Amino acid sequence: MNSSFLVLALAIIVILSYFFNIISRKTRVPSVLWLLGTGILLNYFDGKNYISDEMVGKIVEILGIVGLIMIILEAALDLHITRKKRLLILRAFLSALIILFASSFAIAYLINFWLHEPFIKCLIYSTPLSIVSSAIVIPSVQMLTPLKKEFIVYEASFSDILGILFFNYLIGAESYRPLGVFLYLGEMLFSIIISIIVAILLIYILGKIKLEIKFFLIFAVLVALYAFGKIIHLPSLLIILFFGLIINNRELIGRNKWIDQHTPDRETFKELESQLKTITAETSFLVRTFFFILFGYSINLLKLTEPDVIVIGTGIVFILLVVRFLYLKYLNPNESPLPELFLMPRGLITVLLFYNIPLEFKLTDFNNGILFFVILVTSFMMMIGLFSANQETVEDVEH
């Protein structure tokens, strides 16, 4: 393809994605559905196969890793921790934790019943399917009231973080030894200590750099730390999490003479937070755009019509819906379960974790069409949830 046409195509995709966001706010149809649909159409009209399946898979994987880092950072920058919000944060954390584990084990039993494979392999496959995609849900709930929006933001953020940590534990070599849990908890404690130190150092560097170009340097450091942590098998996403949390919550590092001298003051923190949020949001927008376009491009629509995909995919969605309903109805009974019941899309993290399942844990007969099916159906369910939000739970978007 001519390079000028390629640049034009990329620019048009970004412009389209921007308009999809506007249309999504007006119609409550999630922008991810527009992006996936665009990718599917591109594949349908691409008679010359400009992009091979192997190349699409590799690009999607790379975009997924960068997107994962952006998601965790964006989620952390949205988690403003105050005493007034303790109950809300606790409710969202318990919702994410209980629904994640209940869904993971229920879906694992379904896959085990279907394929008769070892249960641990089935659990590794079911965990990504049980994680709510903050990359999809957070940009889509802007029209809800602040209380409902905050609950969804906290819940989706916790679901991402807890789901990734649980997945990393399951695929870890030490997971199945008698002391595996304690070893993993020890690694997490070590990572938390390192994360806090590195986060404070990064904030110190941010405050000292006088050049205009500094945030992408920090992003590069975060990506390098993530990659290094993956190589030495440490939960390095904690570094990104704590970096974002401290930027957004200066009080977390307390008052200390050395810290006060070597970290920016409160006003500088506010300025850094504002700039970092803007740049992170813009970067996440680009990554999400190309990720879902390419993911849509890679979807084989014929797979969605296969009996296994329809039956098992429907069973998985049914489990997700029932578990979420039972929790919201009986363990979180303060409010109506709507529209939160349907706000459970699967997306970027689900796909990325599927790409990261080690060969020794692969299920030979698992149909990847199920992954496409669950992502599409849960995205449509989110659209239903947003339409079900009545005027009392929706803010006036025009104001």
Image (cartoon, rainbow, N blue to C red):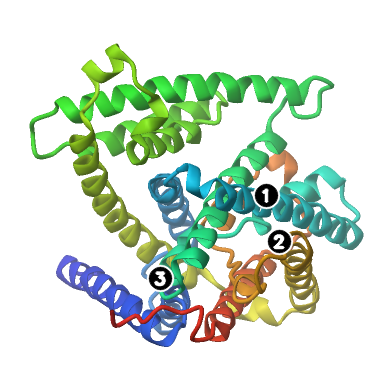
Q: Name the side, left or right, on which 126 lies relative to 3.
A: right
Residue labelled with disc 2: 332
Q: CA distance from mark 1 to mark 3?
A: 23 Å
Residue 398 against residue 105 in the figure, above or below: below
Residue 256 against residue 30 in the figure, above or below: above
| Relative depth, front residue between 328 and 229 | 328
How many marks are shown on the rendered structure?
3
Q: CA distance from mark 3 to mark 2?
A: 22 Å
| Relative depth, front residue between 337 and 170 | 337
Amino acid tagged 3: Gln
- Dot 3 or dot 2, earlier in sequence: 3
Q: Name the side, left or right, on which 397 lies relative to 233.
A: left
In contact (CB < 8 Å): disc 1 and disc 2: yes
Q: Quadrant of the N terminus?
A: bottom left
Residue drawn 81% across the image and 54% down it: 108
Residue 94 marker: 1
Residue 21: image location, x then y, percent: 34, 75
